[in-house]
Each structure stands twice: as structure tokens, then as C-alpha cells.
């Protein structure tokens, strides 16, 4: 199995404009193949708690000191991770292209994976301290896609700096703590959860508890803020959800 994924990783590396490091995991967080550094691999596995409720095409982007790390669900059970010096937008478009080009092969390989580890939704929505990547517009994607060659080729970047361990940013001195007003979505009709079939919608609604803002929910589930707003908007229109105002202390 590892050999198969290594071959795929080698093929992917050939068409990436800049040198990259890759990993494949299943939706239970098991590493199938990896050339990532330990710090980057740990960041990917830390997010594995929400892999089961992601849909193919969902992703998260983490900025490292000298590179970017894309974590992308390439099929129902296979997660792709790419670390590269390439720009964020290029990595996102590359992830989408890989999903499209390897869709059939990934589905074949999924048949050889062990049975997924079943977890309760409440377990999978534990806090994940990785910021959600912002998407790019269709126009931007088109421009970015032009920078990725259609034909496979390999390119070594001269003078490329070696990767260094990921370090936590130093705390800033002089930050002031202030109190701001925020809005919290609250699910007022919990019986509606029994009628919802889509796992991601269930996870979003379970976090509409008066303690999480839309931004909080997006961060915990590793999805875009827009996706959370669409779901809360749909159920708000049905009268099952409402917004309440509250206070929160933040640092500035």
C-alpha cells in the first residue's frame, strides 16, 4: 500500500512548479505514506478528528515559517497533504486537480483500506487549533491554474532554503484585552437534528450552542465560514435557529 501511494506522490511532485513534500492518510488519521517533516505530519494528524465529517474537496491551509501546508480531502476516505514553497492559491488549485485526475485510482485504493474507526460526532468536533484557509474566487483560480503546467515535469529550485522546524510565534508584548459584542447562533429546536442526514450539517448545528460564533464553528470543523453561514441561514429560515448577542474578551 505504501509503495502505491509513494508512486502517486512521485507523479504529483513532477508537475508541481516548485519542490514539494507529500503525505497520504486515511480518514481515521492513519499515515499511508509521508515525506513530510515530523512537525508538519503532526499538524496533519492533529486535524484527523474532523476528517470523517469532511467531504471531498474540503481543505485547510496552514502557513509555516517558510512554506505552506495544504490538507485536502481528495476522496471519501483519502486525505492528501502537500507542503511546498508554492503560493497558497496554487496549492489549492493543485489539490483540486489531483482530486479530479486520481479520483478513480483513489476509489480503487479505498477498497484496500481497513474499516474506518467510527466516532461519535461530539468527538470529531473537538477543538482544532489550525486556522481555516480562505478560498479563492473563480477568476483567481483560473489565473492561478495557468501557472501550473499541464504536462508533467520536475523542477528543482536553485537556492531553495532548507526547511526548519515549525516554531510557535513569540507572544506580543503590550497587547490590551478588550470586551467586544459578538453574535452566537443557537439551535432552539434540537429535535430537528433527528431529521438531518448530512454529517457536516449535524456537526455545525451541534456547535450552535450559544458558546460558539460562526468563526469558532468554522475553525473547529476545518471548513469555510461561508459554509457555516449557509447552514445556519437555512435552519434560521426554518425557525430552528436564532442568533443571540453576547460578550467576549479579545486581545488587541
Image (tube, grey):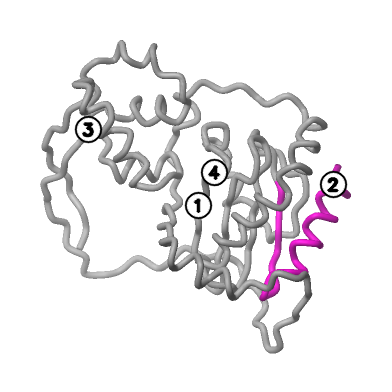
**Element marked by disc 4:** helix
Provide the residue span drawn in magenta. Answer: 1-24
Residue 94 or residue 252, whichever sits in front: 94
Badges 2 and 3: C-beta atoms under 8 Å apart? no
**Element marked by disc 1:** strand
Q: Which residue is mark 1?
A: 60
Q: Who's the residue at 78% across and 43% down the image?
A: 105
Mark 3 vs 4, N-terminal side = 4
Q: Which residue is mark 4?
A: 47
Mark 4 vs 1, N-terminal side = 4
Q: Where residue 97 appears, x then y in whole percent?
A: 64, 57
Mark 4 or mark 1: which is in front? 1
Q: Which residue is mark 3?
A: 185
User: Does residue 110 appear to the left or right of 88 in the view shown?
Assistant: right
Q: Which residue is mark 2?
A: 2
Task: Residue 203: name its quadrant.
Answer: top left
Quarter of the image where the C terminus is located: bottom left
- Separation (CA) of disc 2 from disc 4: 21 Å
**Element marked by disc 3:** strand
Amino acid at each position: 500500500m505504501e509503495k502505491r501511494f509513494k508512486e502517486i506522490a512521485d507523479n504529483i511532485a513532477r508537475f508541481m512548479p516548485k519542490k514539494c513534500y507529500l503525505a497520504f492518510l486515511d480518514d481515521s488519521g492513519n499515515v499511508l505514506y509521508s515525506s513530510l517533516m515530523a512537525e508538519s505530519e503532526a499538524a496533519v494528524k492533529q486535524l484527523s478528528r474532523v476528517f470523517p465529517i469532511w467531504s471531498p474537496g474540503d481543505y485547510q491551509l496552514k502557513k509555516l515559517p517558510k512554506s505552506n501546508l495544504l490538507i485536502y480531502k481528495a476522496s471519501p476516505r483519502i486525505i492528501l497533504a502537500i507542503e511546498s514553497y508554492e503560493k497558497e492559491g496554487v496549492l489549492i488549485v493543485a489539490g483540486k486537480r489531483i482530486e479530479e485526475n486520481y479520483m478513480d485510482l483513489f476509489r480503487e485504493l479505498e477498497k484496500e483500506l481497513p474499516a474506518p474507526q467510527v466516532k461519535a460526532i461530539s468527538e470529531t468536533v473537538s477543538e482544532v487549533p489550525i486556522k481555516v484557509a480562505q478560498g479563492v474566487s473563480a477568476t483567481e483560480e483560473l489565473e492561478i491554474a495557468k501557472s501550473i503546467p499541464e504536462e508533467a515535469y520536475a523542477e528543482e529550485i536553485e537556492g531553495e532554503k532548507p526547511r526548519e522546524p515549525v516554531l510557535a510565534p513569540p507572544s506580543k508584548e503590550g497587547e490590551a484585552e478588550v470586551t467586544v459584542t459578538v453574535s452566537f447562533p443557537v439551535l432552539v429546536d434540537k429535535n430537528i437534528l433527528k431529521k438531518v442526514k448530512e454529517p457536516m450539517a449535524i456537526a455545525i448545528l451541534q456547535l450552535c450552542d450559544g458558546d460558539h460564533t460562526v468563526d469558532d464553528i468554522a475553525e473547529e470543523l476545518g471548513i469555510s465560514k461561508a459554509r457555516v453561514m449557509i447552514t445556519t441561514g437555512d435552519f434560521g429560515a426554518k425557525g430552528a435557529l436564532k442568533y443571540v448577542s453576547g460578550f467576549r474578551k479579545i486581545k488587541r
